[in-house]
Image (tube, rainbow, N blue to C red):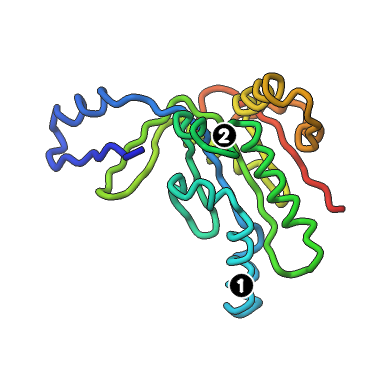
Amino acid sequence: MKSEYVHYKDPTSSQIEAHLKGLEKCPGVCIFVDIVGSTNIKYIEPIEIWGKKLNNTFNFFSLLNDFPEHFVKGIGDELMLYIPDAELINKNSIKDYYSLLEEIYATLDNIMNFPLDDLFYSCKVAIHYCQDVYNLTYFKGFNDYYGIDIDLSARLMSKAVANRIVLSEAFYKKVLADKNSEYHDRSSLCLRNVSDKYIEDFKGVPHPTEYRIINLMKL
């Protein structure tokens, strides 16, 4: 999917309002992945150590290889991916919300329980199912997404810690629907570890947000 490029030099232009008003929403899944501890370690160890760990950790996220066109941005050691519904269903292996969660859970579990020490950084993840999002960019040639659900996805990261997945209730309901319809006969370790529902007031969000967490366990 190509971003809608918005660029008007006249700040009073009525054309920009008409342009933006005509944009269609782009529902999908927003994923934030943050590398834990990578800032502090840069003050302690040389680049050949922390650079290798970053390389290893990013490479372990096969999601980045399966959805390279959906990598939106990196801020420091935090990554944002956005996968529109229309494109998720056309994938081969990871093609629904349940398999997406399973893949992320398996990645974090493999990193945490890798048999050799000091090769990876721990990660934390937030996932939200978005409906109020627009695929638009203000910078030519770049792909980006804006909307209240992108902001909420970022807010969920405040509840994430190392080896934890924070998932909005909206995304959790999508996962359950997939599980009940397509995977009802499959045992699911990640769903067995889902917490009860939390309700939080996040800064800038005018209504309470429901979410759940999955804490991965060291074997």
Residue 37 image offset from top left, x and y in percent: 66, 62
Name the element at disc 1: helix
Q: Give the camera-side residue of 35 and 59.
A: 59
Write down the quadrant of residue 183 in the picture. Answer: top right
Q: Residue at coordinates 65% horizontally, 31% vertically from top-left?
A: 98
Relative to 149, is 99 on the left or the right?
right
Q: Report crowding for label 1: few under 14, some 14 to 19, many 20 or more residues within 10 A (C-alpha).
A: few
Q: Residue at coordinates 32% horizontally, 39% vertically from top-left?
A: 2
> How far apart in space, not on screen, are marks 2 and 1 (Cα)?
31 Å
Q: Earlier in the sequence, mark 2 or mark 1?
A: 1
Relative to 99, is 203 on the left or the right?
left
The answer to whether residue 42 is above or below residue 93 is: below
The answer to whether residue 87 is above or below residue 116 is: above
For disc 2, the marked residue is 95
Q: Give the camera-side residue of 89 and 29.
A: 89
Q: Residue at coordinates 40% horizontally, 28% vertically from top-left?
A: 26
Q: Residue at coordinates 50% horizontally, 59% vertically from top-left?
A: 76
Write down the quadrant of residue 168 in the picture. Answer: top right
The three-letter amino acid code for the residue at tag 1 is Lys
**Numbered disc in front, either 2 or 1:** 2
Residue 209 image offset from top left, x and y in percent: 60, 26
Residue 1 image offset from top left, x and y in percent: 36, 38
Q: Are marks 2 and 1 in contact (CB under 8 Å)?
A: no
Q: Give the camera-side residue of 207 and 162.
A: 162
For disc 1, the marked residue is 52
The three-letter amino acid code for the residue at tag 2 is Lys
